Image: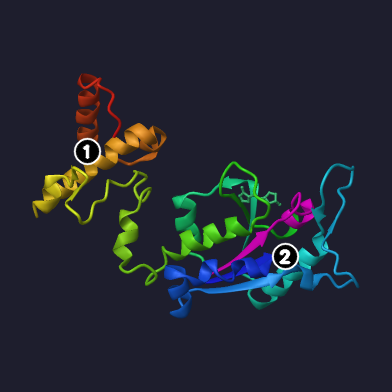
Amino acid sequence: MRFDILTLFPHMFSSPLRESIVGKAIEKGLIQIRTINIRDFAFDKHQVVDDTPYGGGQGMVMKVEPIARAIEWVKSQNPSAWTIYLTPQGKQFNQNICQKLSSRSHLILLCGRYEGVDERARELFVDEEISIGDYVLTGGELAAMVIIDAVSRLLPGVLGSDRSAEEDSFFNSLLEYPQYTLPFDFRGRSVPEVLLSGNHSAISLWRRREALKRTLVRRPDLLDKANLSDEEKKLLDDILQESKTDKSGDGV
Ligand code: 4FV
């Protein structure tokens, strides 16, 4: 999978994507990441890439011409590349969008700066606008890194075993169950016995219950979207009954 990143700050990408799982995926040739400096496509003497907004107002706007040349240069190598603009005005990034993007072979990630890019760059060249959250960053670069990380780990061969992505939070839009490892007891808090039982059906039942309880309390909105099995629906009813009886309100 190829990621072409259009940015004014290519060096921001040098270390974060060279570590750990994404770094290994690059070494294994499972993903290719190329940073393209938009300023290299500003051909005037001062390589100007931004200007004041028409109609006045604060800040600067990224000019359309360097962006157009940069995207057309990439698309001249692969016309089917899919162009994403990272912006707070985009649709909220989530695991479903991540799944869809992981089926593509070439993504162009356009990173805005200042007040953003000229509207015509979006109209003429952008296929999809994505936001990583309702807050304002200084640039789209960190959002691009989030996309690259989340998409890459879904690619075959990137995670130790592809199975582990299937146990992700949100994989079936439930939050993940609590995880434990050695020591068995830490400051008087011990690991739930069932996890040491070796009884795999009891363990997966416990995990499913904990995932449902945690989702019910922390992200009930996800439950509406979750396609729960009949067993899970039954489990959820039990949990709701319990919570009714157990009004002690202890968090889960
Ligand atoms: C952003 C977000 C984001 C807006 C102005 C860059 C900044 C500056 N991108 N999800 N949230 N972008 O805040 O994706 O140009």
Amino acid type of the residue that numbered disc 2 sits on in the rendered structure = Leu
Instruction: Decide which of tag 2 and tag 1 comes sooner along the chain.
Output: 2
Residue 229 in view here:
no
In the rendered view, tell whether residue 15 sits above or below residue 27: above
Q: Which residue is mark 1?
A: 230
Residue at position x 52%, y 68% in the image: 17
Residue 76 in view here:
yes
Region in magenta: 105-122
Work out how far the residue at label 2 is from the one at label 1, CA to CA, in angstroms. 51 Å
As drawn, the label of residue 206 is none
Of tags 2 and 1, which is closer to the observer? 2
Position of residue 184 measured from the top left corner of the image (x, y, whole percent):
16, 52
In the rendered view, tell whether residue 147 sits above or below residue 23: above
Q: Which residue is mark 2?
A: 8
Amino acid type of the residue that numbered disc 1 sits on in the rendered structure = Asp
Q: Quick check: 224 left or right of 91?
A: left
Q: Nearer the viewer, residue 84 or 248?
A: 248
Which element is circle 1 on?
helix
Residue at position x 29%, y 34% in the image: 252
